[in-house]
Amino acid sequence: MRTDGILDRLAALREADAPTHGGRVLSYVYDPGLPELDELAAAAARAVQPVNGLDPTTFTSVAVMEGELVALAREMLSGPADGPDAVVGSVTSGGTESCLLAVKIARDAFREAHPGARPRVVAPVSVHAAFRKAARYLDVDLTLVPVDPGTGTPATADLVAALGDDVALVVVSAPSYPHGVVDPVADVAAAAHARGVPVHVDACVGGWVLPFWAAAGGDTPPPFDFAVPGVTSISADVHKYGYAPKGTSVLLVRGRDRQRRQFFATTGWPGYPVVNPTISGSRSAAPLAAAWAVSQALGTAGYTALTARCVRATRALHAAVDGIEGLRVVGRPTGPLVAVATDESVAPERRVDPHLWADAVRSRGWVLQPQPGLVQEDGARLPHTTHLTVTPVTEAGLDGLVPALVDGADAVRGAPRPDVGAALAAVAGSLAAAPGAAAGAPTSDEVWAALGPLLAAGDDADPGVGVLPDSLAPLMALLEVLPGPVAERALLEIVARVAEPPPDGAPR
Ligand SMILES: *Cc1c(COP(=O)(O)O)cnc(C)c1O
């Protein structure tokens, strides 16, 4: 067996990745800026490498670590530890799995109470995409309530008006990913509770940072946790502001009986009796061990100290954006997420397009995240924005980041959003002309051919990797105007092709 060279190759591949440390990428990664925490997490993961998290009765370390991580999350989120309303929980692979399971619990409870009826979930349109995924996977309907285009906040009355006998669950966010605003959790929960409708608070991104926000010097967030009557479950991702490596979220549920609907168990096959609290069967204990170790090391004091850096950096970024003519922070976010839109109160030639800005800032070494605009059910358009996730290391980098934000805006002020009319016509035209489209479904190759001109994929100098163009603004503008199903089909084709082995089998 040859092992030499393999890790060298991996190191070379990693060189091509976006930087995970140092705060250059303001989404996806959550860097506390503590290298010893990375070492601890790696050592903990290594210590359980051969363990199968499938069976905590055989590998009891898994049960102990899971219990301790859940206990910490429960305390942080004001969950009672005993009584009929005891909050119990489990560790999942990430936010999406926690959200899926929250919907499964509610769907199964609804079906038991209303045999034959079709369950519906109600949420603001700003709810994380994981709930759209849950609705498709679990075959429930989803009502998406509009939010205020200026602030990203849903009106309690609109959410309450959407309640009905067929509603299995209301979901609110603390905060929402697109705009960083905490939804009106207490008011919605009061109304839902009065009607017997359970409420899930999606605190995937906020769950490990909002509990410390006020103690860290930030504004006091509105109530959003189990102290609010009527909140029946909360998701909180340890792999975000819990600073654990990817692969862990906690789903907390009020009431053991409610939570048991999350499980799958069967003795109805000829193999071992199966009991799974989550979607996976066999699962790595490494993410759990790493998250457990990180949370033990930080504790409440450590999380508060890291949150203080986020509070200061977020404040500085708000001030920086407020100082840039032509841009505005969307709404009044609570917590470390910032969405930036064009300030339409200034003259057109003084406005800054947030996606052109993101491209300009990227060319200066900082990666922001463009979010396309969206027309809501009520016809009101949510503006396209650029998202920044602030982490503890953002603070130390402000000296570089703020000038990049300012210079980037200066470079594109007054420039119009890319006109994608021709590209739209070209893509739509080639898709419509594709033979497969006649049957309602262009083939993978037809979709890829239609997209080719838009992407750098045909670039021989860089086959396979770096598929996306340097400038994302035109692609985002196009995604916004393409019909949803076409845009989704196009995007999934790009992502599927990125990971496909090259046809000639050659390493890339
Ligand atoms: C990140 C996030 C999710 C989904 O989490 P993943 O860990 O990416 O699966 C769900 N809801 C919110 C609000 C999030 O920020």
Image: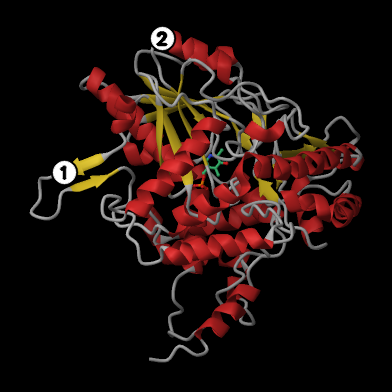
Q: Nearer the viewer, residue 349 or 27?
A: 27
Q: Which mark is residue 444?
A: none
Using the rendered view, name the quadrant where residue 198 is placed.
top left
The mark lying in front, picked from 2 and 1, is 1
Question: In the image, is the residue at mark 2 within 8 Å of ligand 1 by its beta carbon?
Answer: no
Residue type at tag 2: Arg
The colour scheme is: secondary structure
x then y, percent, for residue 306 = 71, 45
x then y, percent, for residue 436 = 37, 59
Say above or below: 217 vs 417: above
Residue type at tag 1: Thr
302 sits left or right of 123 in the view:
right
Residue at 46% across, 79% down: 502
Residue indicated by mark 1: 266
Whether residue 508 is visible to the viewer of this picture, yes or no, is: no
Residue indicated by mark 2: 195
x then y, percent, for residue 308 = 76, 40
Circle nearer the N terminus (2, 1): 2
In whole angstroms, how far apart are the C-alphas of marks 2 and 1?
Answer: 34 Å
Say above or below: 409 vs 451: above
Say above or below: 88 vs 60: above
Q: Nearer the viewer, residue 117 or 289?
A: 289
x then y, percent, for residue 186 = 57, 16
Say above or below: 282 vs 194: below
95 sits left or right of 435 in the view:
right
Q: Residues within 10 Å of mark 2 (few under 14, many from 20)?
A: some
Check disc 2 and report its element: helix, strand or loop.
loop
122 sits left or right of 420 in the view:
left
Q: Nearer the viewer, residue 260 or 410?
A: 260
